[in-house]
Amino acid sequence: MLVLGVESSCDETGIALYDTDKGLLAHALHSQVEMHAEYGGVVPELASRDHIRRILPLTEATLKDANKTLQDINAIAYTQGPGLSGALLVGTSFAEALAYSLQVPTISVHHLEGHLLAPLLEDNPPQFPFVALLVSGGHSQLMRVDGIGEYELLGDTLDDAAGEAFDKTAKLLGLGYPGGPALSKLAQTGKPNFKLPRPLLTSGDLNFSFSGLKTSVLTLVNQHQPLDEPTKADIAYEFQEAVTEVLTTKCMHALRDTGLDNLIVSGGVGANAKLREKLNVATKRRGCKVSYPRLEFCTDNGAMIAFAGAMRLIAMQNHEAGNYSFSVKPRWNLNELQAP
Ligand code: KG4
Ligand code: ZN
């Protein structure tokens, strides 16, 4: 079966074709990062309008790339939430309308389930059950994953998400948007000249808290005015050390508490090289396996949505074409998902 995946929850339009026998055939992405950069963050109305502009050309390019036509599509998976409502509406209405015209079923996908399953797109995918660290712009969660739709929340952030903390700290250092990649690049030239707290490191649970770290960075920034480049790099270095140390330690605690020996990492912050380095060392020491999506599938993309949709489609066996009515779920808790 050939599944078209459509992602438009935030500032990336992603389209992909996943074949349930042959795997990922093609994918295309348009990032709106440059468009939003001058505003220092995502402008929802601009995001929706840009999705409208991109979605058809990207679909045509993906079909061409895979040497397929619209008639080859057997089902359409799309992100129904969570995300920006206007942006979600673009992908959702496009997917339902196209499915109606082709008379094929639709599968509405939870964006975080897409992220969560993205490492399974790679060769030698991890087997269920596993512990998942989901670290994106909006989420920092540890989960026990027993199968598709079988997610148990083990820990969550009490305030800012890891990606949000990267973005806000990058802003304090005068770096561009999105801050994560810029901050981690600057950190490469930094040295361990400062000491920042490791929030909740020894809290005994699997929760995170990153907003205090940002305040500590603000204090450092205020103390070292005017900020020169080496000082900025040293702050970036220490911030990245603090976040990645906490994330790594909590992942190891989650593996210990669940007794599992498989970890997967997904979401935008999963692209962070320092985090990967620390997790590789720590899992090796524990005798555990760690899996990541390829870098381009850490951040938002259509492939993870096509894949999550395909997994649900396979599990559901008889998936009948629906009535093609639609709604979006800008707020949607992963706990509400059920196994297909
Ligand atoms: O998963 P994602 O594309 O969007 C959400 O669903 O939230 O994640 C975006 C987040 C942003 O906060 C961005 O700054 C962060 O991931 N990010 C990084 C890196 N690449 C992206 N954070 C740290 N290091 C990176 N290399
Ligand atoms: Zn995302």
Image: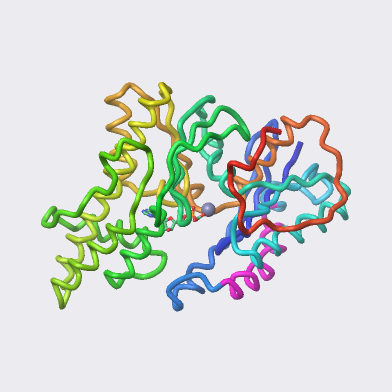
Q: Residue at 68% of width from left, 53% of height from top?
A: 80
Q: Is residue 230 magenta?
A: no
Residue 43 appears in which quarter of the rendering?
Answer: bottom right
- Farthest left residue? 193
Q: Position of residue 310 (x, y in %)?
A: 69, 38
* Span colored in magenta: 44-62
The one nearer the camera, 137 or 68, is 137
Q: Is residue 48 magenta?
A: yes
Question: Vertically, is 85 above or below 80?
Answer: below
Looking at the figure, which quarter contains the C terminus? top right
Magenta stretch: helix, strand or loop mostly: helix
Question: Vertically, is 35 above or below 271?
Answer: below
Q: Position of residue 183 (x, y in %)?
A: 30, 61
Q: Position of residue 55 (x, y in %)?
A: 68, 63
Q: Position of residue 139 (x, y in %)?
A: 47, 51
Display coloring = rainbow
The one nearer the camera, 105 or 217, is 217
| Horizontal side, residue 130 vs residue 290: left or right | right
Q: Residue at 20% of width from left, 70% of height from top?
A: 221
